[in-house]
Image (cartoon, rainbow, N blue to C red):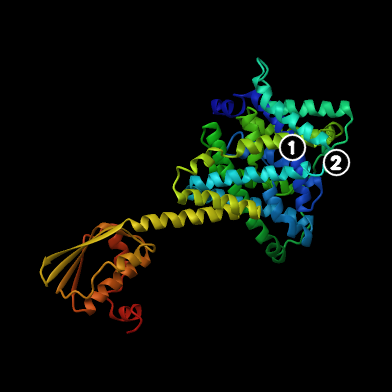
Amino acid sequence: MFESIRQTWFSNVKGDTLAGIVVALALIPEAIAFSIIAGVDPKVGLYASFCIAVIIAFAGGRPGMISAATGAMALLMVTLVRDHGLEYLLAATLLTGVLQIIAGYLKLAELMRFVSRSVVTGFVNALAILIFMAQLPELTGVTWHVYAMTAAGLGIIYGFPYLPRIGRSIPSPLVCIVVLTAVYLLSGMEIRTVGDMGELPDSLPIFLWPDVPLNLETLWIILPYSLMLTVVGLLESMMTATIVDDLTDTPSDKNRECKGQGIANIGAGLLGGMAGCAMIGQSVINVKSGGRGRLSTLVAGVLLLILVVFLSDWVSQIPMAALVAVMIMVSIGTFSWASIRDLKTYPMSTNVVMLATVAVTVFTHNLAIGVFVGVLIAAMNFANKVGNILHIGSEEIEKGRHRTYRVVGQVFFASSERFGNAFDFKESVEKVTIDLSRAHFWDITAVQALDRVVIKFRREGTEVALVGLNEATATIVDRYAVHNDPAAVDKLMGGH
């Protein structure tokens, strides 16, 4: 137990602490921006980010992953806040947490098995594009100073690691923020700073129970929003956990992560914050800055609160150009550049899944819709491929009297029509044997196709024998087949 605690908390103290500092600085403008998107006061996003990061450091299943207020979640809150106000948002946040805990106990994270690698790649690329697009307002209609500062920031981020001795010991994004802030303070140039994003809170968060009626009417108001927040939050968190798993080459407990996200959102709702989830951008910053353990997430959360409450005068002076440079670095590092090269070598079906996920996510700005479309197309491609792996051959055993059909492959909704068309019902034979020893029937559609084949042969006066059914096929055929039930046969064939 003590070894496990040491490994997850104190095996990388320096790296986790420095990475947490970088993440805390980068969280501030994002939390403020997401609060503005949701239509609430900036302190709602900042309190949420502090609370979620601190709780998830202890309760989460993926060490080193950063969770806080996110844009994907903020977009879902706009209508609720506009129509019903902040108190209902806090209530929805609490319900979201409860639903996510339930999802964890139901082990719904196992559904990630059905998300193909091409969908994950598309999700990553779309998020990288969205992160970059989110920086464009800070680079539009501004003076040349902003472009110069941003370029200098990128130069520091990518050049500092090559310096001998200190290049690898201090995260370059942290150096970028400190240096550009010093340049701004010394030069007095007129560019946007964190302070221009919104007023920072001047007090610690306090316990707040949502001031809403505890009745069914309130439940029906917040339930649709809570369900959407639950799905999007868990989807983004599970995707981010998978990506951090790959970056760090370590496993994580996805079901514990579901529960942890739920506990964190309940905590956020009780402290006046909005619902949040894992942040791929900040998680990538953390990993690339050297963060690996739970300590990095805890440092990020605690330092965020300290910065915005006690050091707000200094934090407000950080130029947005410095943070834009950091986020552009995140965007570049997040995008899977290998996926562009792989377009030439991967099958068209795989490329379509990846590109569709990217296109839908970027167009809708909704990660859940993009992933759903990707999974749907991937499932259709898979069904089509498996459905084509079906061969039905025949052999005349006794001329004019007996023919055997041998079915090889998978029979289900995508291949049932092909299965039904493979038999010659006009051939005049006394007996037909259908050998299913190398076939597998998966669903009701397949059983109905078999019923139709048997019934059509019998209507031509042919005796039909089914042989070689494996145990699973025999079970589903025995339970649902109707070719031996005259009344059901008439109904199946349209009453003719």
Q: Is residue 372 above or below residue 423?
A: above
Q: Which residue is painted at 84% across and 44% down in the image?
A: 198
Label 1 sits on residue: 324
Is residue 229 among what the camera can see?
A: no
Q: Which residue is painted at 33% across and 67% down in the image?
A: 447
- Give the CA separation, mark 1 to mark 2: 14 Å
- SS of the residue at dot 2? helix
The x, y position of residue 277, in whole percent, is 65, 45
Quadrant (top left, top right, bottom left, bottom right) of the C terminus:
bottom left
Quadrant (top left, top right, bottom left, bottom right) of the N terminus:
top right
Identify the residue at the far left of this view: 398
- SS of the residue at dot 1? helix
Identify the residue at the far top of this view: 165
Amino acid at dot 1: Val
Front residue (pair 446, 338): 338
The x, y position of residue 487, in whole percent, is 31, 81
The label number, if any, that marks residue 3 in the structure image: none
N-terminal of the pair, mark 1 or mark 2, is: 2
Label 2 sits on residue: 196
Q: Which residue is painted at 83% across and 37% down in the image?
A: 193
Amino acid at dot 2: Asp
- Which corner quadrant of the image does residue 491 belong to? bottom left
The x, y position of residue 30, in whole percent, is 74, 42
Q: How many marks?
A: 2
